[in-house]
Amino acid sequence: MSDILQITIILIASLIATICSKRLKIPAVVGQMLVGIILSPSVLNWIHGGQTIEVLSEIGVILLMFLAGIESDLSLLKKNFKFSMLVAIAGVIGPLIVFWLVAQILNYTLTASFFYGIVFAATSVSITVEVLQEYGKLSTKAGSIILGAAVVDDILAIFLLSIFSSTQEGNANLIVKFGLEILFFLFLFLFHRILPRLWKFVEMIPVYAKHTTVALILCLSLSLLATAVGMSAVIGAFFVGLAVSQTELSHKIEEYTSVIGYVVFIPVFFVSIATSVRLDSVLKSPMIILLFVILGVLTKFLPVYLTSRALKLNHQDSLLIGTGMISRGEMALIVAQIGLAASIISHDLYSELVIVIILVTLLAPFFMKLAIKSKAKDRH
């Protein structure tokens, strides 16, 4: 099947899924991911992926996180940094310990057990952002804490993965990786300061939508730089968006980028991440998958909810933050793929992980919607 035909099918299916999701009053991202499962090789066998789909999908998640950065309130993120950091740490420690213990009880190897913990320590920023945007909660206090904590979660997960892989490659390699990551964040800080000056030069370029063009070039460049130092591309994209949000033309850039992203790239991303589900693997070990799905939900929700309450946040905000941190999505899939490529886990364990990640990710928006509805009811 040609790539163009696959993209056409994905866009048609995504459009129908979005319409149906709104009619059923469920998050649109859930409908798009369910469509991905239906179109996957396990069901209709209409979508097989390929390099073109992977590239479009990768650009989709980068644009989604760039838009999340633009829509974020930097002052609110700074104000809630302490909350985000503590919530993120709680959300990493819970899965790391519980999944390691359970995997050991199930006689998984020591390496695979620790790797499971790292996979489920990460939070999917993109899925959470999509739901928060859909329900207008991204710029609230709870939304800012979730966003900040999810970004910190990804950084911590990447750092743990760096340590984990470097223990097999030597301590010198770990020091190099850690040093590069520190330099990357220093560069992000400087980038935030120099962007307003760069905008003065952009004003002189005689090109249509010049600010959006330059902003997207910077977004993709810093995503590549983040990948080069061993971090997730979404971290670079998010911080570029955050820097752009402080400029006067951020609304215009957001408008143009939204059109570019939501017409093609972002729907392809949400549909394609679900196509990797292999339903035959569910039949092989359904009870283990069910156990891991339950643990995937509880090991994020409980530590995050309890930490939020300990930080004196109200019940409704704590519920939203707890449910907002459940989703795993692309970050966990990336970590799982790294583990497979490095032969840390087998193909069977990889399929098992992917199914659990997808199922947890599908459940997360429903829990978030319930938390948002609970908050709305309490106001009335």
Image (tube, helix red, strand yellow):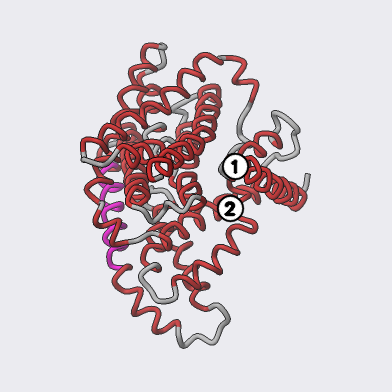
Element carrying mark 2: helix
**Residue in view at x 24 percent, y 45 percent:** 83
What's the magenta bit mostly, secondary-structure-wise? helix
Three-letter code, disc 1: Lys
Query: Looking at the rendering, which quadrant does residue 256 occupy?
Result: bottom right
Indicate which disc residue 266 carries: 2
- In-front residue for pair 322/24: 24
Q: Is residue 191 above or below residue 27?
A: below
Q: CA distance from mark 2 to mark 1?
A: 20 Å
Q: Residues within 10 Å of mark 1 (few under 14, many from 20)?
A: few
Indicate yes or no whether the magenta region holds residue 85: no
Q: Is residue 186 above or below residue 53?
A: below
Q: Quadrant of residue 122 in the image?
A: top left
Residue 291: percent from the left, percent from the top? 46, 18
- Inspect the image, locate mark 2, and give the three-letter code of the amino acid beneath it: Ile
Position of residue 345 in the picture relative to residue 351 (left or right): left
- Percent from the top left, x then y, of residue 10? 70, 47
Write down the region rendered in magenta. 174-190
- Element at badge 1? loop
The residue carrying pointer 2 sits among few (fewer than 14), some (14 to 19) or many (20 or more) residues within 10 Å by Cα, namely many
Q: Nearer the viewer, residue 151 or 343?
A: 151
Coordinates of residue 93 in the picture (x, y in percent): 28, 31
Circles 2, 1 touching at the beta carbon (< 8 Å): no
- Residue 53's mark? none
Residue 34: % across, % down: 63, 36
Q: Which one is closest to the eye, mark 2 or mark 1?
A: 1
- Residue topped by disc 1: 25
Name the residue rendered at 52%, 51% in the picture.
Answer: 134
Vertical placement of residue 254 versus 139, above or below? below
Q: Which residue is at a point 32% across and 68% down the rendered structure image?
A: 191
Q: Residue at x 45, y 82 (%)?
A: 202
Q: Is residue 181 magenta?
A: yes
